[in-house]
Amino acid sequence: MLLALALLISAPPISAPPISAPLRVTTQLERSFLPESGGGEVYLQIDLVAEPSRESARRVPVNAVLILDRSGSMSGSKLDRAREAARALVEALGPKDRFAIVDFSDGARVLVPSSAATQEAKVSALAAIARLQADGGTNLSAAFEAAAPQLSEGRQQGRVDKLVLASDGQANQGISARPALLRLALQLFGGATVSSFGIGEDYDEQFMTRLAVQAGGRARYVSDGAALAQAFAQEFSRAAAAVAHDVRLEVRPFKNVQVERVLGFEAAAGGVRLPDISAGEERRVLVKLRVPPGRGTAELADINLTFRDASGNEQKVRTSAQAQYTADAGKLDAQQPNRITWQAAMGEMADAAADALKYQAENRPAEARRAEAQVQTLAAKASMSAPARAAHLLQERASEYGLQLFRSGEGGQVARKKLSAATAEDSTIPADF
């Protein structure tokens, strides 16, 4: 049974950012007491809130690099959408920004080298975008290798590095294995934020989503071509409003404690990369811990968070999670499910839905059905102990996932693309229980 909450925090936090720092970090454990004889699983909730303020809301200069797919698979309306996206980015640039555009097919070329976003440079870039023609294969690795020097050229203290890929993600030349492409992006782009825009109903949503998630960005799919330019401009504006980027979380468990999962993220050595956070945004991360039996007060884990603020300065937050053991059955029985329990259920549901999509894409229908059933099981179990509003939200989310998974399983590409992007966001967005 999942029970109530409280976190004992070592005071004062070590290396905490100053009071004026733009990002507020709080942590809580799901329950106050653990059984001496059993230990068990418990969720650690980490909340990150970017306070809106005059300073944090100011527009931050951006070092933007756009990678445009012009391969033969992008012919027709796909390339039209890519051009619209490129124009939206160029038109959103401010005088303190820098930008570059790389396009690719069999190979890659620097269409617009890293330049200050002067009016003259923007007019020239728009003319180059208008001349784009689709032809050849899809060499994503060449595009990544061409984009990295342009990103470095525009890098400067106080300027946010932002890379955007607009493609169908159907790599078939150069390095085409998806894991190798993901590793190459990590190697070449470092702390830059990478967002992906899937173009067309046949784009590789698994790869494009993972590319964005591993680099603190967002995976976007906009089926309506008329809305693509607006969505692209919004993504750029969000980068310009970032108050915390290159956000990295590391949870170091103490002896015999295990980190089972960070909901919404794949396990990686050295922690996970969290999405960038703009002024007024909130993010919530759930960490599933397995705790051994014990007595008294026990240290569970060190929590280390690093990020770069709008000026490019590194900020650090460090604290620790502790548990209180008890043999008092009354104290254990008095604990009840709570907001952390229900938020964890939301995160587990998102992960299960993402697993179902992956199995569908891999043509593993039995595994897909089991993951789909897990979504509904999680919602039903959490709803049993939840108040009406929380139960409604859980059931509503499960119904949405179920409908989209059904459509995806029947071959609905739009449903698959939208759900892939949604589950990546849902894992870290606080629910209003």
Image: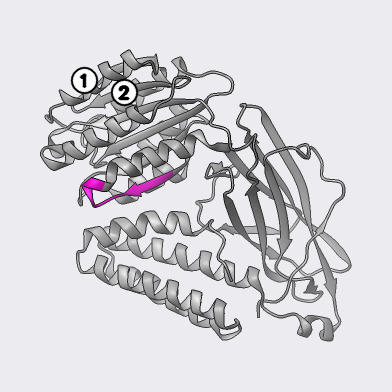
Magenta stretch contains residue 223 = yes
Image coords of residue 121 (percent x, y):
32, 15
Image coords of residue 110 (percent x, y):
29, 18
**Count of labels in the image:** 2
Q: What residue is drawn where x is 28% and y is 47%?
A: 227
Q: Nearer the viewer, residue 195 or 208?
A: 195
Q: Quadrant of the N terminus?
A: bottom right
Image coords of residue 154 (percent x, y):
46, 17
The answer to whether residue 146 is seen in the rendering is yes
Instruction: Please report the bounds of the magenta region as a residue range.
Output: 218-226
Query: Which mark is on residue 31?
Result: none
Q: Are marks 2 and 1 in contact (CB under 8 Å)?
A: yes
Amino acid type, residue under disc 1 in the picture: Ala
Query: Which mark is on residue 128?
Result: 1
The residue at the far front in this view is: 54
Query: Which mark is on residue 101?
Result: 2
Badge 1: how crowded within 10 Å, few (<14), some, or many (20+)?
Answer: some
Q: Is residue 223 left or right of residue 385?
A: left
